Image (spheres, rainbow, N blue to C red):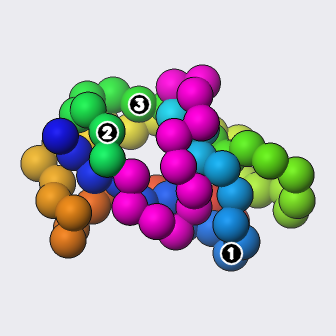
Amino acid sequence: MEFLQVRFHESRPVIIDDHEQGKTNLVIELAGGLHTISLGGNGSVFNPLQQTVFINNTTVVTPYVVSFT
């Protein structure tokens, strides 16, 4: 298993490969590999609209970090 943290200035659902799988600013456990990340819910507009990343060799202490602004 791998670990991801999606950073954003407010709490929002995290959408991974078209499925809600956690909340922003918390560590999310997921399978390694290529994933498309976006944010869900209502609230502030964010950029970019989505990010595609390859997640590998992470730990709960050192997750892969994706930031939206």
Q: Is residue 25 left or right of residue 60?
A: right
CB atoms at circles 3 and 2 under 8 Å apart?
A: yes
User: Where is 14 relative to 19, above or below?
Assistant: below
What separation in Å lies between label 2 and label 1 (alpha carbons)?
22 Å
Say which amino acid is labelled 1: His
The Cα–Cα distance between marks 3 and 2, rounded to whole angstroms, is 10 Å
Frontmost residue, 36 versus 48: 36
Quadrant (top left, top right, bottom left, bottom right) of the C terminus = bottom right
- Is residue 57 in sight in this rendering? yes
The kind of residue on which mark 2 rests is Leu
Residue depicted at 66% across the width and 50% down the height: 13
Q: Is residue 33 left or right of residue 65?
A: left
Helix, strand or loop under label 2: strand
Q: Could you tell me the amino acid type at mark 3?
A: His
Q: Is residue 19 magenta?
A: yes
Q: Which residue matches tag 2?
A: 30
Vertical position of residue 18 compared to residue 4: above or below: above
Circle 1 packing at 10 Å, graded few (<14), some (14-19), many (20+), is few
Residue at position x 71%, y 71% in the image:
10
What percent of the width, then of the height, locates residue 26?
Answer: 46, 65
**Residue appearing at x 11%, y 48% in the figure:** 57
Circle nearer the N terminus (3, 1): 1
Labels 3, 2: front one: 2
Instruction: Write down the residue under mark 3.
Output: 35
Start-end of magenta stretch: 17-28
Q: Residue at x 26, y 41 (%)?
A: 55
| Dot 3: element | strand
Residue 8: x percent and y percent? 63, 68
Residue 33, magenta (yes or no) = no
Residue, disc 1: 9
